[in-house]
Image (spheres, rainbow, N blue to C red):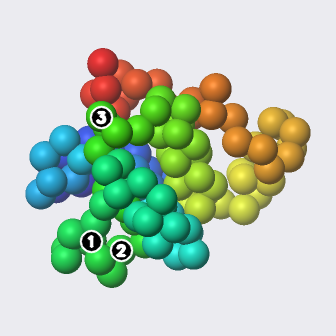
Amino acid sequence: MSYGQPGLRVRRKLFVWMSPSEVGALCVRVDPDEKELLLESNPNAYFTTPHYASYLAVLVRFEHITDEELAERIEDAWLLCAPRRVVGEFLEKVGGTEHCANQPLVPAPVLGLV
């Protein structure tokens, strides 16, 4: 939980959470180099607010993003926050650095998406 909203953590690091201020928006941690690219690539899906401008995160509107892209964003956020050893084991298990968007890390009910 983050400010009374559902969220996902790895080793106490929040990597995905429902925005307490932007109703229906999901906050997802992103690489600093990726943030601007995402915001420019699909402004209907990815956005920020003055509150989140300094965060290494973007806000996501569910209705403008595919399930596969959402799974990729969640996986990337987890990879940013998880311990290196765990990330290494995961990447070895899935065969490298390819995304596993067709195998989401988090079931939709956990995020309240169904």
Q: Quadrant of the C terminus?
A: top left
For mark 3, what is the residue? Answer: 63
- Amino acid type shown at disc 1: Tyr
> What is the C-alpha distance between the residues marked 2 and 1?
5 Å
Secondary structure at badge 1 equals loop
N-terminal label among 3 and 2: 2
Secondary structure at badge 2 equals loop
* Residue name at image x 86 percent, y 46 percent: 96
| For the residues bearing labels 2 and 1, Cβ distance under 8 angstroms | yes
For mark 1, what is the residue? Answer: 52
For mark 2, what is the residue? Answer: 55
**Which of these two is toward me, 107 or 34?**
34
Q: Residues within 10 Å of mark 2 (few under 14, many from 20)?
A: some
> What is the C-alpha distance between the residues marked 1 and 3?
20 Å
> Tag on residue 113?
none
Q: Position of residue 72 (x, y in %)?
A: 57, 43
The extreme top residue here reads 114
Question: In the picture shown, does residue 68 fall above or below 10?
Answer: above
Mark 3 or 2, closer to the camera: 3
Mark 1 or 3, closer to the camera: 3
* Residue name at image x 31 percent, y 61 percent: 47
N-terminal label among 1 and 3: 1
**Which of these two is toward me, 68 or 16?**
68
